[in-house]
Image (spheres, rainbow, N blue to C red):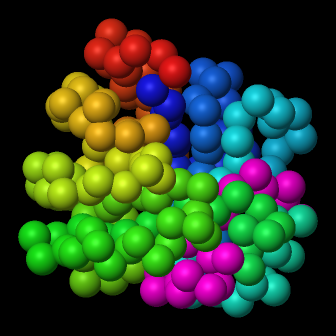
Amino acid sequence: MKLKVCGMRDPKNIMEIAGLSPDFMGFIFYKKSKRFVGEEFSVPRGFPDNIKKVGVFVNESVEIVLKQVSMHRLDFVQLHGDESAELCGELKKKTKVIKVFRIDESFDFNSIREFNSYADFFLFDTKGDNFGGTGKKFNWDLLKQYDQQIPFFLSGGLSTENAHEAEKLKSMNLHAIDVNSGVESSPAVKDLKKIKQVQEILTSNFFSK
């Protein structure tokens, strides 16, 4: 089971967390986010090649996204807005795509079938009033309705207290869990102890892939 640590910004904290070797680390390029990396951001020198860099965007143009991909050598783009399947397809010609869907009780999983050819992964997060994460967990039982082949990331309020509950989803094509605010000491600053605890939970509860 893979781990993604999202919402990174501080260079020192980035390298501290990188030392724990999560599989993915996410950097938010959405200006309205509390974890926006800022205009002068750059990935610290010496960042490990084995950790996949994910850029998070909301309703940006293909041109702007690809500019950031090139500038920061991003391995994936995570699209957290109302991006169309066509836009995802354009980006997928140049990079790997994680398409986010915000889940509530009324979500129709059939509505995302059109994205199957245009995303490498899906990410299911809790639906809120605004774009971006809510820090809250959604009803994971809704994922029983998901019957497609695209592997997915699980996000939304994951922490040391509930990460073990994701074990019941391991047979549903769950690829990775995505942690952010639930493992922070302050916005965009991740707590090493909490990340280690999540890693221990994943090691104890999941078969490695």
Q: Is residue 151 above or below residue 134?
A: above
Residue 164, given in percent of the width and then of the height, sits at 23, 26
Q: Residue at x 29, y 54 (%)?
A: 147
Q: Residue at x 48, y 16 (%)?
A: 208
Among the 4 quarters of the image, the one containing residue 57 = bottom right
Q: Is residue 95 above or below residue 176?
A: below
Number of marks in picture: 0
> Quarter of the image holding residue 59?
bottom right
Q: Is residue 110 left or right of residue 94?
A: left
Q: Nearer the viewer, residue 102 or 35?
A: 102
Is residue 14 left or right of 79 when viewed as pictured? Answer: right
- Would you place residue 9 above or below residue 161 in this image? below
Q: Residue at x 38, y 73 (%)?
A: 112
Residue 186 visible in the shown view? no
**Residue 78 is a magenta residue:** yes
Quadrant holding the N terminus: top left
Decide if residue 142 is on the left or right side of residue 77: left
Looking at the rendering, the stretch of residues picked out in magenta corresponds to 71-89
Q: Nearer the viewer, residue 23 or 173?
A: 173
Q: Position of residue 143 (x, y in %)?
A: 21, 53
Left or right of 11 in this view: 179: left
Q: Kindly tell me whether residue 152 is visible in this rendering.
A: yes
State the residue lying farthest toward the top.
204
User: Does residue 209 show up magenta in the picture?
Assistant: no
In the image shown, does 115 or 17 lie closer to the viewer? 115
| Residue positioned 63% across, 77% down in the render | 88
Q: Nearer the viewer, residue 95 or 11?
A: 95
Residue 161 image-quadrant placement: top left
Give the vertical position of 195 relative to 111 (above or below).
Answer: above
Across and down, in percent, residue 182 comes to: 32, 44
Provide residue 13's location: percent of width, then percent of height. Answer: 63, 39
